[in-house]
Image (tube, grey):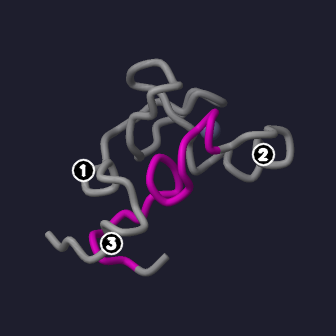
Amino acid sequence: MTTQNNTTVPTVASAPLVRLICCCCGGVTRGRQFFNQDTGYGLGTCCVEFVKPRVQDMARTYGIEGVHYLAPQAVGAPK
Ligand SMILES: [Zn+2]
């Protein structure tokens, strides 16, 4: 655990990745629960490229890239 990213990343970023159901295609993905998504659901890595051009406010709808979706699989992995 490190705290060096706390200035730029919300505290949720230090939470463990969880198994989520992709809210777009229903596939299994890994990410973090976002309050605007139903419990257990989140944007899957599988569908990020699909929804990005179609959603006006990604941050409000799906959360933060690299935190709630497209999160690195391993701790300390480069972005
Ligand atoms: Zn998907």
* Secondary structure beneath label 1: loop
Residue 59, position in %: x, y? Answer: 62, 44
First in sequence: mark 2 vs mark 3: 3
Ligand 1 quarter of the rendering: top right
The kind of residue tagged 2 is: Phe
Task: Quadrant for residue 76, please give it.
Answer: bottom left
Question: Label 2, label 3: how many angstroms apart (C-alpha)?
Answer: 29 Å
Q: Residues within 10 Å of mark 2 (few under 14, many from 20)?
A: few
Question: Label 1, label 2: how many angstroms apart (C-alpha)?
Answer: 25 Å
Task: Quadrant for residue 47, please give it.
Answer: top right
Q: Name the main secondary structure of what is drawn in magenta.
A: loop
Q: Which residue is mark 2?
A: 50
Badge nearest the viewer, 1 or 3: 3
Question: Label 1, label 3: how many angstroms apart (C-alpha)?
Answer: 15 Å
Badge nearest the viewer, 1 or 2: 1
The kind of residue tagged 3 is: Asn
Q: Can you say whether 79 is above or below 25 in the image? A: below
Q: Which residue is mark 3?
A: 5
Q: Disc 2, ligand 1: is the CB inside 8 Å?
A: yes
Q: Are marks 2 and 3 in contact (CB under 8 Å)?
A: no
Name the disc covering residue 16, or none: 1
Whether the magenta-drawn stretch holds residue 60 is answered as yes
First in sequence: mark 1 vs mark 3: 3
Outermost right residue? 53
